Image (spheres, rainbow, N blue to C red):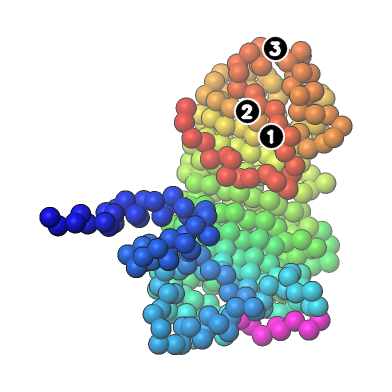
Amino acid sequence: MASPNPRLPAELTDHVIQDLRSEPEALASCALVCRSWTPAAQRIILSKISIHERNCSEIIEHLTSATPNIASYVTRLSVYLWGDLRKIINRSTANLTPLLHLILPHISHFTHVTELVLDGCRAFHDLQWDEIWTDLLAAAFPSLSKLTVHYLTFEDLPDLVDLVSSFPQLTHLTAVDLDIAEASHEYSNEEQEPYEGSKIPPPRLEIITYCSGARFASGGGPFLLWLAAGPQAFTALYLDLIAEAGDVNAGVELIGAAGSNLKTLSLSFDDQWHLWEGLDLSANSSLSSIGFKNVSDFGSALVDILGSVASPLKRLSLGKVQDMEEDTWPGLIDVLMSPVFTSLAQVNFFVDSSEKSADELKGDISTKYPNFIARGIAVFEFKLYHKWDDNELEYIGE
């Protein structure tokens, strides 16, 4: 009698391996079990790689060798442009040769990349983006859907615009701590030159995460205005804006431009002078989730802003509520109890202080506003500002 086939169906092994995505050691073991398991395990193990000064030479050597090209498994490629300078103890001797420049001649081997992360560690050097890289990356990744640019310096605004607009299939854009050298200014919130070219944002761009540059980095405001002036298909905006960078009012315009497409909004204004103006959410008629990281950003205007909501809101998150003025609470509760907010399924009050715990705040609100607490939608939590997770705003269920 013939012996039974000991092999498991490919669909079953693929399912088992997929369940181990977050366990790299287990995946590595799977790759060694048998030849039939190796491809599925490698597809996950090698789906995300980071190129930095410690592995760049080895990766280039592999890409130029006759061995099987594992680069085809990579879907998320991260490149530290000048090396991961944060982890080099003696930065004075760090090799600042542009690693991206070294890898670009071999970039065509990465045939399935859909997400690209470019990290410049801007705080540790003054080197700028080379505009030549833009065309080479655009040619290598014509179907790129997610682009993340961290800590980069661009000579002028068109260099940044050219990079973003070079990927017509882009749906997700993350821009953190960028600097435009020619837009440097001496005074806070000084008006900057707008973009005057012909490039438009990718028409399929839906999700934008933007964090203003620190230490008076410049140029962000005009970039946000360029996004606002283009095709507005934005369904989610995660904005952490600083007045010194000229970003705050530009962010307000971006929110307005999103109109009825916008479903998720996370917002933070670092603006002690309250220079922003015109924030009104009435045009965003599809909003289902809103998060304000720091309620004191908006002062007494918080009630008016929420009062402008005209959408069937399901989720509201308010951070650092221990800093909210006492006379703001009655108006806030009145708005949350109004007929417009009957769709609310959850309100998160985040406390970021050792002076008053989340339980103490809950007790105070329960005593003062029992009818609101009786709705059963209020959640009180301790959560530090820098640990706010924007993904928490993605509302699931009714």
Q: Examine the residues drawn in magenta and state their main secondary structure.
A: loop
Is 83 or 38 nearer to us in this picture?
Answer: 38
Q: Residue at x 48, y 83 (%)?
A: 62
Q: Residue at x 75, y 42 (%)?
A: 384
Query: Hey, what amino acid is under mark 3?
Result: Pro
Query: Hey, what amino acid is under mark 2?
Result: Val
Give neighbour class at mark 2: few <14, some 14-19, many 20+ (Cα, 10 Å). some
- Give residue 318's position: percent from left, percent from top: 69, 34
Residue under numbered circle 1: 318
Is 322 or 268 nearer to us in this picture?
Answer: 322
Tell me which label, 2 or 3, sits earlier in the chain: 2
Does the residue at mark 1 contact the one at mark 2 (Cβ under 8 Å)?
Answer: yes
Q: Can the viewer see residue 156 in this picture?
A: no
**Mark 2: which secondary structure?**
strand
Query: Hey, what amino acid is under mark 1?
Result: Leu
- Give residue 306's position: percent from left, percent from top: 64, 31
Query: Residue 347 — which label?
Result: 2
Residue under numbered circle 3: 370
Is 28 or 97 nearer to us in this picture?
Answer: 28
Q: Residue at x 84, y 62 (%)?
A: 187
State the extent of the magenta-drawn residues as a range.
Answer: 92-99
**Mark 1: which secondary structure?**
strand
- Give residue 80's position: percent from left, percent from top: 63, 73
Q: Residue at x 36, y 65 (%)?
A: 34
Q: Quadrant of residue 155?
A: bottom right
Q: CA distance from mark 2 to mark 3?
A: 15 Å
Q: Can the viewer see residue 181 in this picture?
A: yes
**Magenta includes 93?**
yes
Q: Is residue 25 left or right of residue 365?
A: left
**Magenta includes 329?**
no
